[in-house]
Amino acid sequence: MVDDVASLVAMTPETFRKERNIDARILHEVTEIDLKGRRVRVRRLDETKEWWESFDQLMIATGALPIRPEVPGADAQGIYGVNTLQSGIEVRQVVDRQGPKRAVIIGGGYIGLEMAEALVRRGLEVALVERTPQVMNTLDPDMGELVSEALMAVGVTLYREESLQGFEVGKGRLQAVVTDKRTLPADMVILGMGVRPNAALAEKAGIVLGERGAIQVDERQQTNVEGVWAAGDCVQSFHLVSRRPFYVALATVANKQGHVAGVNIGGGSAAFPGVVGTAVSKICTVEVARTGLQERELQQLGWEYVSGKIEGRTRVGYYPGGGRITVKALAEKKSGRLLGGQIVGLEGAAKRIDIFATALHAGLTVQEMGNLDLSYAPPYSPVSDPVLVAVRHVAKSI
């Protein structure tokens, strides 16, 4: 949908230098951190030249890596992990120049679903393989079913409860995807199996790791080593609802953590209290949103909870352009404290998740939420917003 790649670049190295007085060196890789010597080993990729660079303060923001399956043929040409702008550009160039006809997506998370939409828009025949019963496993199964229906409605063929076994390869190039139930011919494969923290460099240096192998930091974003900081997709967070360590790879979280680390490195004082796991996505016309804990997580914690789900419309029924919306809310059984919210619907649905996210940060109960003074006008909402209808429905069970 975006023709000019340059419009996706927020800041170039030249802009960093001229406007921020920051020496941003691209095509340079840090291969080793020497904490005792307070230095890092740097390799310039286009010259294979290496040297040591000293530091007073060190910021680690190495991000995440796409999970690649350990199956036969996984290194073949035509298999792509999409986790950076450059990797997205490469897939776009393949579609533009090579004209693939059949694509298979492995995994039904955010990247997998968004890539499925992008490839359908480009006219490819798209199949998606997911090992669980539903796509989008950050939603409860009943809400994930709505997303599955939306995918199939735009022409994506879903193969659920199927596990990847390997890839058929000819002359080093992908030919087909092999699952435990079938073989799917493919010109290209997109890996949407999630990401893992890119923390090997920090671990090798002796920096303590935490949840899912992410770098452990305090609320100031400092590691266990004085003057060594970390932020972004390589870092562990703290979940404000479960009150436990938590790992999530989202741009909003990375931005906040980076800001906090920068303030502290610069001599100021800032803290990042944690996250509630808020995320939104779009699959063609369907908007998907979630925040807080889902039923599976509550069951693992052993918490007693109640849930409620309602179906409504994003606008007043008589007003043109509205669409269906399904809202689900989860609350603590005894106290009524909100624990999570999920939304699937048409235009105007997803950003309502911010009401749930704000309530989670404030520790509101569903009873308190039912009295929130939300805005109303026919172009934007029914008189009682679907979020309010959902929390009032849950409140009746408490």
Image (cartoon, rainbow, N blue to C red):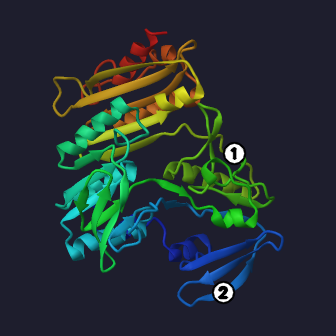
Check the image and report above or below for 251 versus 310.
below
Whether residue 80 is visible, yes or no, is: yes
Which is more foreground, mark 1 or mark 2? Answer: 2
Whether residue 375 is visible, yes or no, is: no
**Position in image of residue 343 (x %, y %):** 36, 32
Q: Residues within 10 Å of mark 2 (few under 14, many from 20)?
A: some
Tell me the element at label 1: loop
Check the image and report above or below for 159 versus 36.
above
In-front residue for pair 262/39: 39
**Position in image of residue 318 (x %, y %):** 16, 23
Pointers 1 and 2 in contact (C-beta within 8 Å): no
Tell me the element at label 2: strand
Residue identifier under label 1: 271
Quadrant position of residue 30: bottom right
In-front residue for pair 339/204: 204
Rendered residue at 51%/77% (across/down): 14
320 sits left or right of 5 in the view: left
**Position in image of residue 298 (x %, y %):** 53, 27
**Extreme right residue here?**
36
55 sits left or right of 391 in the view: right
Q: Which mark is residue 280?
A: none
Residue identifier under label 2: 50
Rendered residue at 74%/53% (across/down): 268
52 sits left or right of 297 in the view: right
Rendered residue at 46%/62% (across/down): 70
Separation of marks 1 and 2 at Cα, in angstroms: 36 Å
| Type of amino acid under label 2 | Glu
195 sits left or right of 320 in the view: right
| Type of amino acid under label 1 | Ala
- On the rendered image, what quadrant is the N terminus found in? bottom left
Q: Residues within 10 Å of mark 1 (few under 14, many from 20)?
A: some
